[in-house]
Image: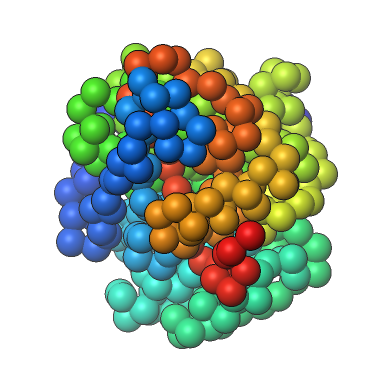
Amino acid sequence: MTLGRMPELPTSDDIAIAVERLREHVRRTPVVRPGRGAFGSDGSVDLVLKLESLQHAGSFKARGSFNSALGTHLPPAGLIAASGGNHGIAVAHVAQALGVAAEIFVPAISSPVKIDRIRRQGATVHVIEGVYDDAQTACDARQAETGAFSIHPFDATLTLGGQATMGVELAEQVPGLDTVIVAVGGGGLAAGLALSLPEHVRIVCVEPETSQCLRTALDRGERTLVDVSGVAADSLGARTIGDLAFHALRDRVESVLVTDESIVEARCRLWEDLGVVAETGGATALAALTSGAFEPAPGSTLGVIVCGSNTDPSDLSS
């Protein structure tokens, strides 16, 4: 898969506009310091967790969705989107907040919890056999019929501009930040961080071994279709990294892979140690630290993004 034309990445001005646009619509999510040596970190590391899991609609996706909807003139048909779950919940939340209709296409592998939350926001849900890409294909066909405004979860300029607001926020909350660990699916959140954090901040992108579209693209030097599976496939299971994201990330980030087992363990530890509810995708960044797949530099100030909480909490204890 070739790169094609240079995509339109959001500029610093676009991101500044998004910060103001979203000020009354998204939460300034908290950061917590679990203590020196927490989660297996070196005692000299200042570990900070960014709890974007407490964002409206349960994930960072609300940022990109609100920025997209508020940054355009919405048609009578309202909003439409394809999603593994979190993006759909966010778009449905935005539609409800703005008083417009929404249709969401989800793959059959999506969590029943997430599908139910989309419906409870008032959106019409279409469950499509296959994975995220199949849902996107069905969504595109429906959008052509209705003329609804399609909000892409990770490969659109307004989406990335919205996700970038979290980087602006994090840099304000943690002035000495020098390293960030973030999970990657289609790459929208990681790209937003790459576009908004200062150049000196080290960005470590974490993917499950079973869903590694970014690592494959970095290794091959181009976007490539990959097979996806595993415990976090509903949120991190994009078959290819976004075009925008790849341009933002390819010369900026490091790639780390983690096992499904380490993701499940990190999710349970967030609950048992801090009382923080996270879905598997939301715990994937932390898994790089707890498993030893990533070792931060001694004395660093390390931010770990806990990016989503849309999960059934009944199995949180290991």
Near-viewer residue (65 or 60): 60
Q: Residue, x 43% and y 37% (percent of image)?
A: 38
Q: Is residue 85 above or below residue 43?
A: below
Corner quadrant of residue 242: top right
Q: Is residue 15 above or below residue 124?
A: above
Q: Is residue 203 above or below residue 262?
A: above
Near-viewer residue (1 or 160): 160
Q: Is residue 179 above or below residue 263?
A: above
Corner quadrant of residue 298: top left
Q: Residue, x 75% and y 32% (percent of image)?
A: 224
What is the x, y in percent for residue 179? 40, 24
Q: Where, quadrant-wise, is the N terminus in this rendering?
A: top right
Left or right: residue 119 compared with residue 219: left
Left or right: residue 100 compared with residue 118: left
Q: Where, quadrant-wise, is the C terminus in this rendering?
A: bottom right
Q: Residue, x 47% and y 21% (percent of image)?
A: 296
Query: Would residue 71 be seen by someone viewing this image from the given angle?
Result: no
Left or right: residue 240 compared with residue 246: right
Q: Residue, x 39% and y 25% (percent of image)?
A: 43
What is the x, y in percent for residue 81? 55, 64
Left or right: residue 243 compared with residue 260: left
Query: Would residue 121 be seen by someone viewing this image from the given angle?
Result: yes
What is the x, y in percent for residue 157? 43, 42
What is the x, y in percent for residue 74? 36, 67
Is the image coloured rainbow, by chain, by secondary structure, or in one colour?
Answer: rainbow
Near-viewer residue (103 or 166): 166
How many numbered discs? 0
